[in-house]
Image: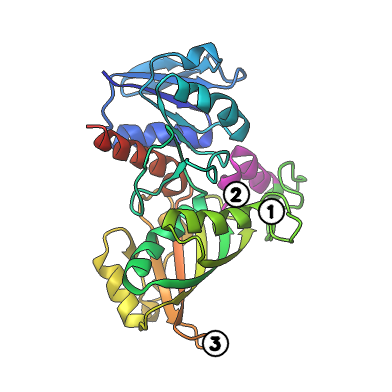
Amino acid sequence: MTKLAVVGATGLVGEKVLEVLDRKNVPFDELVLFSSPRSAGKEVEFQGKTYTVEALTEEKTDGQFDYVIMSAGGGTSKAFAPLFEKHGAIVIDNSSQWRMHEGIDLIVPEVNEPKLDRKIIANPNCSTIQSVVPLKPLLDTFGLKRVAYTTYQAVSGSGLAGREDLSNGEKGEAPKNYPHPIYNNVLPHIDVFLEDGYTKEEQKMIEETRKILDQPSLNVTATCVRVPVQDSHSVHMNVTLDKEATVEDIKNLFKEDDRVVLVDNVENNEYPLAIHSTGKDEVFVGRIRKDDSLDNTFHIWCTSDNLLKGASLNAVQVLEQVMQLNK
């Protein structure tokens, strides 16, 4: 008998988690939905049943759960994930709280597999997830020397507050979530600034890429930018390979790899677009071209739905992966 909990079930990602669980028909016998006290008591329809969302408390972590998917922020995860773990559950956490902790698996199922030294598994940053999916076949085939990211991240990466700043900004209202208007604007600023001038979001991408790919000395840099797009992140990757390659080599590699979808027919203006990624599970790559300013270096454009592959879908895929490992 499998008992599953979803924490943060009424949030943007939590709602998507339930949609993906339903769509993928993930097997479980009992489901419990948790939220903050503010959202407790709400009713959620799922697979023909009505669930009443419960406020998460310390006592309720001892509920004989097998698996817990958490999408409720770092503070909640820090407080409650170890309690669920202590009581025997495997926790899949969507926050940034545990990603770089020693012994905590950081998992993208198309790329790596959990060791489960701890029963907390971290879901990576949304932009990192979609980026390492195409980087993995490049690493395995050609090797990687350097990766430089520039991201173009949708406002839904900030949850409902980001969406509201975009829609309210169109009406001329001042932002409540971002330090500047996002409507008709671009913000080279995601998360807090660090002493070296990078933002925490940029540092996450750098460190998480190395950890997921198991390449601790890989040269990685990033600039993360918020754009006035509702859903789906776009990432430009400038990638230096270890072994010699051509544009056609890379295109053929992606054509044959079912982890990505190649959209690269510039003669007909066909390339990955955020509006085409939204609502889809896949990671799309295209606009592949050689960077003539650096040896054996290539430009790759990548788009993906940040609420699906970048969060909820990846978490459910991790759940499926762990269920398979536990058989």
In the rendered image, residue 169, in percent from the top left (x then y), is placed at 71, 48
Residue 290 falls left or right of residue 190: left
The amino acid pointed to by label 3 is: Ser
Q: Residue furthest bottom?
A: 292
Helix, strand or loop at label 3? It is: loop
> In the image, what residue occupies the spot 51% across and 21% down?
83
Q: Mark 1 packing: few (<14 Cα in 10 Å), some, or many (20+)?
A: many
Q: In the rendered structure, which segment of residues is drawn in magenta?
A: 153-168
The amino acid pointed to by label 2 is: Val
Instruction: Between residue 115 and residue 236, name the one nearer to us.
Output: 115
Task: Indicate which disc residue 293 carries.
Answer: 3
Vertical position of residue 168 compared to residue 135: above or below: above
Nearer the N terminus, badge 1 or badge 2? 2
Q: Mark 3 packing: few (<14 Cα in 10 Å), some, or many (20+)?
A: few
Q: Assess whether mark 2 and mark 1 are in contact (beta carbons under 8 angstroms).
A: yes
In the rendered image, residue 242, in percent from the top left (x then y), is placed at 41, 77
The amino acid pointed to by label 1 is: Ile
Q: CA distance from mark 3 to mark 1?
A: 33 Å
In the rendered image, residue 261, in percent from the top left (x then y), is placed at 32, 63
> In the image, what residue occupies the spot 50% across and 60% down?
216
Viewer can see residue 291: yes
Helix, strand or loop at label 1? It is: loop
